[in-house]
Image (cartoon, rainbow, N blue to C red):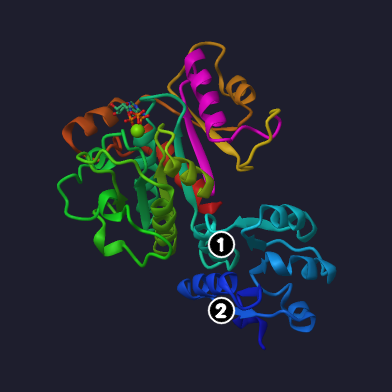
Amino acid sequence: MKSDTCDVLVIAGVGEIQELVLATAAALDLVAVVAVDLDVVAKLWNQVGTVCVAEDFAALTAAWALPRRGGVVLLGGSEVLLAKWSAPLDAKVIPLPAGALWLGSILDESAGKTGTPVLAVLGGSGGVGASTLAAGVALAAAKTGRQVALVDVDVVGGGIDLLLGVEHEEGWRWPSLASAEGYVGDLCEYLPKIAGVSVVSMARNSAEDLASEPLTAILHSLRRSHEVVVVDVGRSLSSACREAVRLATDHLMLVSPSIRGIAGARQVLRTFQLESATETTPSLNPAVVHLVLRGKGAAGFGATTLGETLGCPVIARLEDDPTVVAAAARGDLPWGRPRGGFRKTCSRLASALIEG
Ligand SMILES: Nc1ncnc2c1ncn2[C@@H]1O[C@H](COP(=O)(O)OP(=O)(O)OP(=O)(O)O)[C@@H](O)[C@H]1O
Ligand SMILES: [Mg+2]
């Protein structure tokens, strides 16, 4: 067998786990091969994007003592077996049935078929300008000719379509997408679009919270069909917000450089378990959160102090730009004047995101 035709190695007997992995791989157009004997496994071990091991094959796989590698996933319903074999196999754990929906993203990422960055934009405090920044970075990325999606996850944020002036555009918003699960095809033609940005927005007439499953499914779909995805996470603590933060490849937090701004930002980092690894609570998400400072701030709250206090690097400073507010009031794109500070900063952040 030619190794370049195989994306996923499945070490599992006939049964639900094998079926789940094969179906998930097929939905993503990935080639999966089932193998339970050492010869085949050893041949493919270092050549596939992901190795999926069913819990009842974990002991056997560990006994083979194959070289350590990334991208091993251990799946099963027994907490005891998952805990026992995750370290010997150096494996990520997918507890079933709840974790079945993450499998697609793991297979997708490991196969390297989507390197699309997903930027989560967080506000360190309410009204600091996070939604405007998320929109600005998305617009700046689209200016480079890339396919960009902007996703609003803030149930109480008023709808990012309103911020972008596409509230009257036909197209799907979260209520139409909220039952999505698993694999979702290309959504491009169904979403409202402005200035090259496809928009997934909240609806103002819905009181429903957003669950994490549809968020996962939609983000994966957008990653496959776009080159940049920006998520306005908002400040609610819904499971969808947490999932967006977990799935993001990059994180920006806009912080007001004041005592309350810093206190709020610290709380947001804690809430989303994005604290730096130096904190006493170990971080679940090792991603680095880059800080953007909003406005000038009081003396003593410079970039260095703020970065040190929050344990995150400061990547940019976003000056107050009255033309952003004026544009928003007119119903124009919230993007300020052509060579204004807001646009320049958003372009710089978009470039950093695209270039990785
Ligand atoms: N760089 C900026 N310069 C001047 N005004 C800005 C800037 N960014 C945002 N604003 C203004 O600040 C207000 C709040 O912005 P925005 O809705 O983006 O904040 P937010 O952090 O998303 O708020 P929320 O906590 O409600 O989600 C808006 O009136 C917006 O036009
Ligand atoms: Mg907002």
Residue nearest the observer in this picture, 158 or 306: 158
Name the one closer to the observer, 143 or 167. Answer: 167
- At a point 56% along the width and 19% down the height, the residue shown is 302
As helix, strand or loop, the secondary structure at mark 2 comes to loop
Is 124 drawn above or below residue 349 in the view shown? above
Q: Amino acid at mark 2?
A: Val
Q: Residue at x 39, y 64 (%)?
A: 225
Which residue is painted at 69% across and 56% down in the image? 82
Mark 1 element type: helix
Mark 1 close to ligand 2, CB under 8 Å: no
User: Alpha-carbon neighbours of circle 2 within 10 Å: few (<14), some, or many (≥20)?
Assistant: some
Tell me the mark number nearer the camera, choosing from 1 and 2: 2
Quarter containing the N terminus:
bottom right
Spot occupied by residue 301 in the image (x, y as percentages of width and height) = 55, 16
Horizontal side of residue 5 vs 63, given as left or right: left
Q: Which mark is residue 31?
A: 2
Tag 1 residue: 109
Describe residue 254's horizontal placement relative to residue 6 as left or right: left
Q: Give yes or no for residue 319 being in the magenta stretch.
A: no
Q: Position of residue 151 (x, y in %)?
A: 36, 47
Toward the bottom, the furthest residue is 1
* Range of magenta residues: 249-278
> Where is ligand 1, by quadrant?
top left
Q: Identify which residue, 222 or 154, lies in the foreground.
A: 154
Residue 157 position within the rendered picture, expressed as x and y whole percent measured from the top left:
31, 34
Label 1, label 2: how many angstroms apart (C-alpha)? 14 Å
Q: Kindly identify the residue that appears in the image at 76 percent across and 54 percent down.
A: 84
